[in-house]
Amino acid sequence: MRLFPAFHNLRILSKLRLYLAIPLLGLLFFAASELTDDYQRWSNATASRGFLTMGTTLSSLARQLQQERGLSTKFLAGDNHVANQLQQQRIKVDRLIDRFRREISHPPHVHLQDFPRESERLVSLFNKIASVREDIDSGQSSIYFSEVIDHILEMILQMQLVSANLDIAQIARCYNALQWLKENAALEQSALYKLLAGKNFTALIYSDLNAHIAAQDAYLNKFLKIAPAAYRDLLQNRLNASVIGDFMDFRGAILHKAEKSLALNELQIMIGYGGLIHHFKNYVIRGDLHYLKRFKRIHSEAHNIIAKYRSLPNITAKEKHNLDVIENTFATYANHLSTIQRMREEGQPITAIDARVRVDDNPALNAINELSLLTGQFDAQQWWKLAAARIDLLESVIATVETELRQQTERNQLLTASKFIGNFTLTLSIFFVTVLLGKRLKRRLVGEIVGIAEKMHEIANNHHDQTLIVEGSDEISDMAEAFNHLLANLRETNQKLRRSEARYRLISSLLPQQIWTATPDGNVDFVNQRALDYFGLPEEQILKEGWPRVIHPDDLAQTLELWSHSLQTGAEFETEFRLKHHNGSYRWHLVRAIPQHDENDSISKWFGSNTDISERKRSEEH
């Protein structure tokens, strides 16, 4: 049983087209799939490069905003010398903002989640910068710059991670870690400058400083964990510069001072109104136990603070002496508690109790003031320079990584473009070569076979005078040669048949009878010249219309019945009927026909003759 019978009924050219089309379509499908992936990678690389350009602008903008924030910090701290520099810096920032607005109006053609919304939010933040600057000029501080820079750095990371290239993604993460490291270094620079310029150490400022330092350590560790060895070595080399040692010493000293100042501030609060001495006096006057409890709690806290101060590094002997004075003063107050209780139980007047437990506070207050002087003074400008030098070193590493990121992105775009164009060209080449080979195969195989089929069709229509052109030496050429040989034999046979037919016609024309032949189904296919002369009709008309046209109507039915019987049985045909002469008269003829059989004993031809018996018929009638 044949599968797909309709396929077997197709012409050979259609079959060949199917044989070529199916694998070609399969090739094109897989090629199209691969090309789609290549194009996607190319588009991704192109978008990555576009976002890198935008990210470079944002990185520059973040740097300039950090500069403006630093100058604003110095301006707010009372350094009026930076006013002109601050105005120039604002111009730089505004130019970069305008540049970003232009770039964001034509973003790369790739979908990036939340990018449009985040861009709009950043633009809205930029729209507020004029009012923020007015506030700064009037002496009001703001967290605006930190908020904008944070948003910029988040957007930069989001844009840089568009690339599907793992190496580029790794460099982008390193770049972002360095950016955050630098941002927290800049925040530390501004925060400590404000602290030094204002000479006001508070727990909140100290907490912020530690947060900025901890963040720097975190981003530094992140960078060292994900960065290639070359980047790690570069950063370590920069951090080994002598200015970094000075920076670390300066920062350590400030932090130590901050810790000491915080401890001293707490001690001053404990001594002042609402503190340890206040509750001691109230207990002397009123004898209320809750004042006693508060005194004991504050005394315990003061003891812990002093112990914490003693544990700080680099404590001098003078500082320890002053701490002893403060602690002894607090201890004296504590020792008087039992005296107060005893005298109150004895009913002593308050004036007597107060005179008995009076403590000189001046040594403790003087000790605290002296500790404040011993913690040292720091130059805010010197800190700014050291911190700025460290930031510049970080910036140099960032610039190196940024250059590498840009080069890698450009190289990746070129590689993906080259791969896409190469694969596209290869696919087209394979397609066209396949088509050309198909046409060649069609011309060689199908063309020759179709040519043979057409020649056979011509042979069937008795056109035997053409031959096939033989090309090559394959099976097709062998078939063509065999076909030409067959045609030659057929032409020779036809020539013999034509010569035989010519002899037959010549002989039949010499006979006095009308000679004719018919096909096995009874159609006349030959009449001799004597018949043509008798009927006076063209041969084509006689062969087309047959005997009914020329047989007398009265004899036609019986004649056809006898002829049909002979055709069916193969019996010899013999009868007499009248045939119409070309002058319109009818003459009697004796008509006889005998069959010729082939090798299968089937009738292949009928041979007949018409003999004029009109004279005999007239004699018989008389």
Image (cartoon, rainbow, N blue to C red):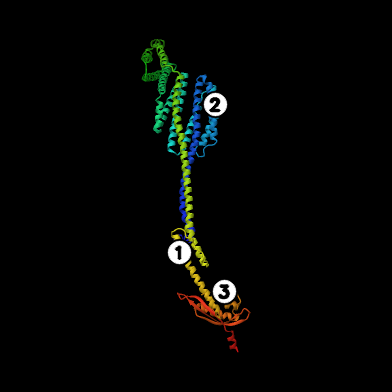
Q: Amino acid at mark 2?
A: Ile
Residue 551 spot, x, y in % from top left: 59, 79
Q: Residue at x 44, y 26 (%)?
A: 393
Q: Quadrant of residue 254?
A: top left
**Quadrant of the snapshot with the C terminus:** bottom right
Name which of mark 3 and mark 2 comes first in the sequence.
2
Residue sitting at the far bottom: 622
Name which of mark 3 and mark 1 comes first in the sequence.
1
Provide the residue designation for mark 3: 543
Would you place residue 91 above or below residue 613 in this image?
above
Q: Amino acid at mark 1?
A: Ala
Within 10 Å of disc 3 (Cα), the crowding (few <14, some 14-19, many 20+) is: some
Secondary structure at badge 3 equals: helix
Q: Is residue 554 visible?
A: yes
In the rendering, which numbered label is found on residue 91? 2
Secondary structure at badge 2 equals: helix
